[in-house]
Each structure stands twice: as structure tokens, then as C-alpha cells.
Image (tube, helix red, strand yellow):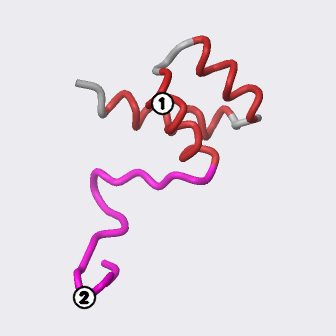
Amino acid sequence: MREANGTLAPISGNGFTTLDRGAFDALGIYKKFGNTKEADDILNKMQISPKSRKIALDVWKRNQK
């Protein structure tokens, strides 16, 4: 737990996924474009690693309704 402004907030645990910078950036692209060729093209240009893409895509898929 980490205290921020007097409030305790979890920083890890069941249901949390730690994102590196690449995965965080990739998640933003997936949120905007979905799992599309356009997103893939953008991520290629950004040189986001396959590992970071997979982590981001897994998080994105879990949050689709």
C-alpha cells in the first residue's frame, strides 16, 4: 500500500497488472483504435516490443464490455 494525500491505495496485488512505459503507451493506442491494423501500424512505428503489446492487449481485452 502506498499513502497518497493521506489515503491508502494499493500498488500491486490480485487483479493489478504492472505496465512498463511501452505497455502503457500501447494500451493508450488500443483504447483509441482497438485491436486493429491501424493500431498495429502505429505500434510498429513507435517500436513497441511484442512483450509490451501483449501485456497491453491483455489488459485492453479484459476491460472490453
Tell me how many marks there are: 2
Q: Compared to 23, does 42 lie above or below?
A: above
Q: Is residue 22 left or right of residue 3?
A: right
Q: Is the magenta stretch mostly helix, strand or loop?
A: loop
Left or right: residue 30 versus residue 49 is: left
Mark found first going from the N terminus, 1 or 2:
2
Give the quarter of the image for residue 63.
top left
- What percent of the width, then of the height, locates residue 58? 43, 33
Marks 1 and 2, how far apart in space?
33 Å
Q: Residue, x 70% and y 37% (percent of image)? A: 49
Q: What stretch is highlighted in magenta?
A: 1-21
Q: Name the kind of residue labelled 2 in the image.
A: Gly
Structural crowding at the residue carrying mark 2, measured as other residues with C-alpha within 10 Å and reported as few (<14), some (14–19) or many (≥20): few
Helix, strand or loop status at disc 1: helix
**Image quarter for residue 8?**
bottom left
Label placed on residue 57: 1
Of 38 and 49, the residue lying toward us: 38
Q: Residues within 10 Å of mark 1 (few under 14, many from 20)?
A: many
Secondary structure at numbered mark 2: loop
**How far across and how far down the image is residue 2, in percent?**
34, 80
Tag shown at residue 6: 2
Above or below, 38 against 23 in this view is above
Which numbered dot is residue 8? none
